[in-house]
Amino acid sequence: MAVDTVSSSEQRGTGLMGMLRRSARLRLGLLIFPGLLWLVLFFALPLLVIVLYSVLTPGPRGGVLFTFTLNNYVELFTQDLYVNAYVRSVWIGVVTTLLCLLISYPLALYIVQQSPRWRSVLLFLILIPFWTNFLVRTYAWMLILSNNGILNSLIQAVGLPRQTLLNTTGAVVVGLIYGELPFMVLPIYASLDRFDFTLMEAAADLGANRTRAFLRVMLPLTMPGVAAGSVLVFVPTVGQFVVSDLLGGAKVDMLGNLLQRLFTRSNPPNWPLGSAMALVFMAVLTIGVVLYFRKTAEAEA
Amino acid sequence: MTDGIAVELRDVVKRFGDVTAVDHVSMPIRDGEFFSMLGPSGCGKTTSLRMIAGFERPTHGEIYLHNKPISNTPPFQRNVNTVFQSYALFPHMTVAQNVGFGLEMKKVARDEIRRRVGEALDMVQLSGYDDRRPRQLSGGQQQRVALARALINRPDVLLLDEPLGALDQKLRKEMQLELKRLQEQVGITFIFVTHDQEEALTMSDRIAVMNAGKVLQVGTPTEIYERPNNRFCADFIGETNFISGKVVEADATGAAVKTADGLVVRGQHVRPIQLGEHVVVSIRPEKARLLPADDANTLPVNARPFPVTVERVAYIGSDTRIEVRLGAQQAFHVWEQNARSTLDRSEYWQQGEQGLLWWPTENALVLTE
């Protein structure tokens, strides 16, 4: 039926269907339109607003005054509070990503070598924590790490003095690793799953010991997974504010925490400074990720 | 090197769980020979090869490389190289990097590597392909790269695991000859695993026929084909007719076997047999003759041909394959070479025709089951 309708209107060459039939461009445009509209409304326009705000003056009770200035950027790059937050965020992001990588690669390698049935079970186990609310899981870490928490009870049980675990950078990193680990494990698992393990035998056959075979063959060939996992972990980590808030107290300020404060908690809120901060943050991440992908693409080539 | 034995398996057993893949195998492989392990899939040939390479460890027994036990030596310390069934070329490296990988691992100087990679690619006729990636090459070219990558290390022994399996028929034949030529040129011991009997016969100096984890016979291609020493070998290599029955007469070399139909078939035996023993007589289809029913006078005086009926005739170009019925139910295949070029159908056998089937006694082998 439908085919008949289309072909008959094509023959007549009239109406919207006829035009669509004839113009590939029009068809393409129609297909792209909803997605494009979405991006413009919810990404491009807000971004423009942020760009605009970042060069305006903060209003007395939040909001903005239409007085153009570059002061916001100057402030970002000169005040220790902000510079430190950038450095700390990137540093925590790098450490978290590296530790995730160190944990995830052997884990993924182990899973991929199991029987197909075991693999699904293990992958399932990795995903299970996601079924619980992230906030609840982070609170659970507070219980584990607090001064009278589970870990400290264990430490004291073996006769060691109580340790300050909560509200440290370490606690934040632990919480971040815990939350981000699956995003590293899964892409690495996917590329190991495609990896032909005969190549490791070939490398051994040609005189490469395990380390060299890994470095020269397995790692380069699973680099796409490592790269994807690293970006998936690094980007959200740098922008985190919940974990650093809950496990770091007010002591471990990351970018996300400052942003949140600038927009909602400080009195008066400073939207222009927050906007400038978000933009610089975006630029740093974009440049970092692009460079990283270039580098790993080179390693692959 | 002293006694000319390159590799020796001594009473080697390999079990995977409760499956015995290799079952008390012993075989010496001589220096510089082209040695094939031939058998159906699951016969233990690839497992044996993988144990020589070092990818598997024997459950029992020992493997010697030039008289040194190597079971505890990891693969990367054995002077043995492998050409894998799937080639296992490194996809992220160029042809030159692939071929030079072994030398790089041995920390050979760069200039030296470059020179020897050039030589190796020359040897397999792939000069100028240095900077290509494996995926840009055809199957046959990948095969050559795999060969060059292994041979450049000048191994004591080269192991080849069904390397021609993935190639099409024509390329396969070319590579068979090429492999043989290479082996003669470099003089390295080749151990070749295949399930293709023709391949094994064409290339090998000696063949080990394997089945169910055991070595059944080791010999030259001629020995294996002309004097199989058991039923499996006769059946697996080439084609043959089996007539089963009981030994009714036996002397030092010959025997008479009586079938259930009461036919008496004579042949020679390669292993001692006993009266009353159940045996099969194996006669290759090209070693029997089918004669017109009134042609008995052209046979030797004491010949006793069997009267047969032609059941099926298949013309396959180089020869005609005729299936006849011998006695009540015994099917028997005879191949006649189409030596004369003719379109005349009457020159060929017809279905339902009567004939005489005969073979010289020495063409029939009495084998134990």
Image (cartoon, coloured by chain):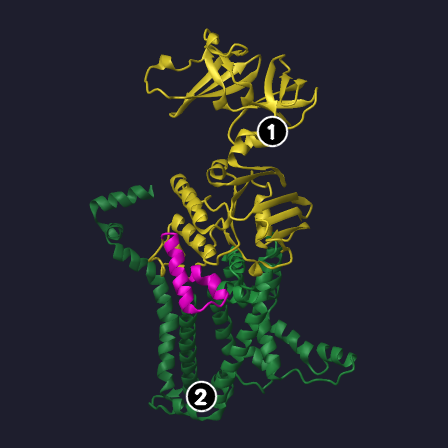
Q: Residue at x 54, y 80 (%)?
A: A92
The chain coloured yellow in the image: B
User: Is there any visible trace of residue A239 in the rendered image?
Assistant: no
Q: Amino acid at mark 2?
A: Asn
Secondary structure at badge 2 equals: loop
Residue toward you, A170 or B323: B323
Chain A, colour shown: green
Q: On screen, B170 above or below A21? A: above
Instruction: Point out residue B185 in the picture as x, y percentages from the top left corner.
Output: 43, 49
Please state the chain letter of the residue tagged with numbered disc 2 in the rendered image.
A
Secondary structure at badge 1 equals: helix
Residues under labels 2 and 1: Cα distance? 93 Å
User: Is there any visible trace of residue A269 in the rendered image?
Assistant: yes
Instruction: Point out residue B312 in the picture as x, y percentages from the top left corner.
Output: 46, 17
The magenta-colored residue range is B96-125
Q: Residue at x 47, y 14 (%)?
A: B310
Q: Residue at x 56, y 78 (%)?
A: A242
In the drawing, does residue A241 fall left or right of residue A156? Answer: left
Instruction: Point out residue B351 in the picture as x, y percentages from the top left corner.
Output: 44, 13
Q: Amino acid at mark 1?
A: Arg
Residue toward you, A150 or A21: A150
Report which residue position mark 2 lands on: A270
Rendering quarter of residue B343? top left
Of badges 2 and 1, nearer the viewer stands 1
Binning the other alpha carbons within 10 Å of mark 1 as few (below 14), some (14 to 19) or many (20 upward) gives many
Count of residue discs: 2
